[in-house]
Image (cartoon, helix red, strand yellow):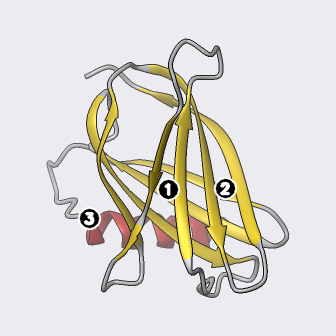
Amino acid sequence: MPRLRIWLLGALALHVGAAPGAEPILGIHIHSDAAMFQVLISPGKAGNDSVVLQLMNGDGTLLPARAATLVLSRPDGSAEPIRRKAELGGDRYWHVENVPVTTAGRWHVRVEAQTAFKTIALEEDFELPEQ
């Protein structure tokens, strides 16, 4: 599984335009037996960010999602949750642009993927660095 995770993060980093010397992208890997979600936040620090979601089944194959939603919140409740519908791109990844994640520190991410038969929601906490 670690090799798969490294490969996926590398592939997504290339996809969202990371180049040598570019600012790092914050990658969050969330998985369960049923699904595995990659969340890439660019530029990966406090400010206005873009998010790419790669949604996969538990075996690493593409999850046939009909819709995806990103929810970011502060675990301490210090800010209203940010809830955005993602748009499916031609690259088969889900995209959310201009997400105002303006405060560094501890955040909680929840990704909801709707398939033809069910909704799968995975979530994880992460640390967002200062600018």
Q: Residues within 10 Å of mark 1 (few under 14, many from 20)?
A: many
In the current view of this chain or complex, which residue is farthest to the right? 33
| Picture quadrant where residue 17 is located | bottom left
Q: Amino acid at mark 1?
A: Val
Q: Residues within 10 Å of mark 2 (few under 14, many from 20)?
A: some
Sequence-first tag of 1 and 2: 2
| Picture quadrant where residue 66 is located | bottom right
Please report the residue visible at 57 percent of the width from the left and 23 percent of the height from the top: 74
Using the numbered discs, state the Cα–Cα distance from disc 2 to disc 3 in whole angstroms.
Answer: 19 Å
Q: Amino acid at mark 3?
A: Val
Q: Is residue 124 above or below residue 131?
A: below
Q: Is residue 13 above or below residue 106?
A: below
Residue under numbered circle 2:
30
Residue under numbered circle 1:
39
Sequence-first tag of 2 and 3: 3
Could one spot residue 58 in this view of the protein?
Answer: yes
Residue under numbered circle 3:
16
Numbered disc 1: secondary structure: strand
Q: Position of residue 116 (x, y in %)?
A: 70, 86
